Amino acid sequence: MEQYVIKGGNALVGEVEIGGAKNAALGILAGAILTDDTVVIENVPDVRDTNVMIQAMESIGVIVQHVDKHTLKINAGNIHSQIVDGDYIKRIRASYYLIGSLLGKFNKAEVTLPGGCNIGTRPIDQHLKGFKALGARDAGVVGGRIEAHADKLQGAHIYLDMVTVGATINLMLAAVRAEGRTIIENAAKEPHVVDVANFLNCMGANIKGAGTDVIRIKGVSELHGTEYTIIPDQIEAGTFMFAAAVTKGDITVKNVIPKHLESISAKLQEIGCEIEESDDAVRVVASRRLEHTHVKTLPYPGFPTDMQPQITVALGLAEGTSIVTESIFENRFKYVDELMRMGANIKVESSTAIIEGVNRYTGASITAPDLRAGAALVLAALAADGFTTIDDIRYIERGYEEFDVKLRSLGAMMEKVEDDSAIQKFKLKVG
Ligand code: UD1
């Protein structure tokens, strides 16, 4: 099984190009099947989650051509089934977007229940409530599948009980071709919700208000082909920004939208980093010991839950006591046990982590419990004294393209290895 072996201690310095937003790409890929015309999508990240999504689309007859590594040409004119089955689909969360788009196009969809990271119970009741309101009266879970069927889809007024990115995107996908008007209240405002809406509008949809908490959709009977470029990944960028913070480095993340990174930049400043913004880049310089702070994860524009493990790793090295409160997912501190093996001093009480900063982490043998926590543990290893091996890096590869390659280009001493002899070789090489 592949692992990372890392020798910590180097300050990471340099520039890194950020790829397309994974979570936007997943919604956009699903949205591309709403038309029979060809759609060209640029800046698709080449990560495991998008590749599973493509595999699922191909399994029902969608033709996906790679124009280059990050550009796809998609034609969904010959879909032969509205049933997406198979164990592989459980590996991703966003497979449920195929329910929204298949229902939106064919009034019928059956998709194996999604998996994704184990960070809480992750119910789908809001998706189902919305599909029912749009006319899929039977929408529900049957034999391990989400099923939804409708005679026709009719616009509806949907109030989401909590802010959910997944349900907001899924209901937009289902509603764009429904008859009449749909209003989604208490909608998520994340940049990738806006990106999916912009993409659908480029295909001829009529969606207004994406990025606010009320989204208004006027149904159209047909969508058409388009060319679209996905926004940069806010979380990949944020992860590299925190890599600068924990290694006392100096990293410029390029090809980003600084506005999307505001809550991350603000926290980095608060803990003692210098931030320089330009049109499409953000530079993070960390020249002294980090300072403690309090942070609570919140829906956008709040501090993202997908950055919670990374900030916890940084605060674990900060002076004084910090408090991190997770308000989105109830089971998102599992990685703390691994971090404690590296010398962190953290106490978790339900959704709050109380962190007493230590001077340094020490290398250990640890396991990535999920995607973002896995990436955060890599940051801890890069800051640590000595060698760390990280198992289960397949989780990290779900959402970070060439993570090790990009980190090495900034001066990280790390390698992806397959067995113990490769670990020994690396240790001999770097001394
Ligand atoms: C998406 C992202 C994930 C990110 C999260 C929050 C994808 C593939 N994943 O996950 O990386 O961490 O947004 O930014 O885009 N909820 C319900 N019922 C529902 C739906 C959600 O109770 O029907 C709850 C969830 O349990 C959670 C909260 O709402 O507590 C937010 O979930 P949501 O925003 O939907 O997260 P995901 O779309 O699963």
Image (cartoon, rainbow, N blue to C red):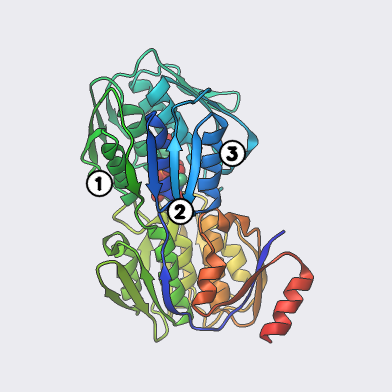
Residue type, mark 3 in image: Lys
Q: Which secondary structure, mark 1?
A: loop
Q: Nearer the viewer, mark 2 or mark 3?
A: 2
Compute the Cα span from label 1 to label 3. Answer: 29 Å
Picture quadrant where residue 108 is located: top left
Residue under the point 52% across and 72% down: 407
Residue under the point 57% across and 57% down: 397
Q: Is residue 331 above or below residue 252?
A: above
Query: Mark 3 sits on what residue?
Result: 90
Question: Of marks 2 and 3, which one's residue comes earlier in the chain?
Answer: 2
Q: Position of residue 350 (x, y in %)?
A: 49, 54
Picture quadrant where residue 212 is located: top left
Query: Mark 1 sits on what residue?
Result: 211
Question: Of marks 2 and 1, which one's residue comes earlier in the chain?
Answer: 2
Which residue lies most toward the top here? 151
Q: Position of residue 46 (x, y in %)?
A: 51, 53
Image quarter where the N terminus lies is: bottom right
Q: If the picture is divided into quarters, which one holds ligand 1?
A: top left
Q: Are marks 2 and 1 in contact (CB under 8 Å)?
A: no
Residue under the point 71% across and 80% down: 427
Q: Position of residue 71 (x, y in %)?
A: 43, 50
Q: Which secondary structure, mark 3?
A: helix
The answer to whether 47 appears left or right of 224 in the picture is right
Q: Which secondary structure, mark 2?
A: loop
Q: Is residue 271 or residue 166 the one in the foreground? A: 166
